Image: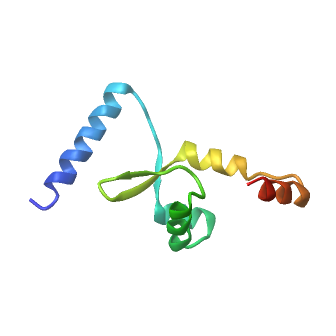
């Protein structure tokens, strides 16, 4: 059974969600790249440089929690180009 390990892992994740009543939405790298109209390579580079939203790496798969994506987007909001320049200089 080729999917046995992943299937068991996914079953355990679903069980944890049911038990804790947590509904956590995730996007994979491809979905986030499409959301932001950037390349997957850009997201890969950002992860290696510590840029962008927090991410999970589970069994070799990269996932982004919706809440972390929205928090990162919120942190990037600006009201003027001067605000953006100040944020870039502040790091």
Residue at x-position 67% and y-position 51%: 73
- Coloring basis for residues: rainbow
Residue at x-position 50% and y-position 63%: 48
- What is the quadrant of residue 20 in the picture? top left
**Left or right of 84, for residue 1:** left
Which residue is nearer to you in this view: 50 or 21?
A: 50
Which residue is nearer to you in this view: 87 or 34?
A: 87
Q: Which residue is the extreme one toward the top?
A: 20
The percent coordinates of residue 41 (x first, y second) are 51, 73
The percent coordinates of residue 10 (x first, y second) are 26, 46
Image height of 91 relative to 14, above or below:
below
The percent coordinates of residue 84 (x first, y second) are 83, 58
- What is the quadrant of residue 82 in the picture? bottom right
Q: How many marks?
A: 0
Q: Which residue is the extreme one toward the front?
A: 90
Q: Which quadrant of the figure contains the C terminus?
A: bottom right
Residue at x-position 56% and y-position 70%: 42
Residue at x-position 85% and y-position 60%: 85
Image height of 38 relative to 35, above or below:
below
Which residue is nearer to you in this view: 11 or 90?
A: 90
- What is the quadrant of residue 19 in the picture? top left
**Left or right of 10, for residue 47:** right
Q: Which quadrant of the figure contains the N terminus?
A: bottom left
């Amino acid at each position: 059974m080729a999917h046995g390990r992943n299937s068991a892992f996914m079953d355990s994740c679903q069980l944890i969600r049911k038990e804790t009543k947590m509904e956590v939405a995730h996007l994979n790298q491809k979905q986030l790249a499409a959301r932001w109209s950037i390349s997957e390579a850009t997201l890969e580079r950002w992860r290696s440089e510590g840029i962008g939203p927090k991410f999970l790496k589970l069994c070799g798969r990269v996932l982004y929690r919706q809440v972390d994506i929205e928090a990162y987007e919120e942190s990037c909001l600006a009201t003027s180009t001067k605000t953006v320049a100040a944020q870039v200089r502040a790091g």
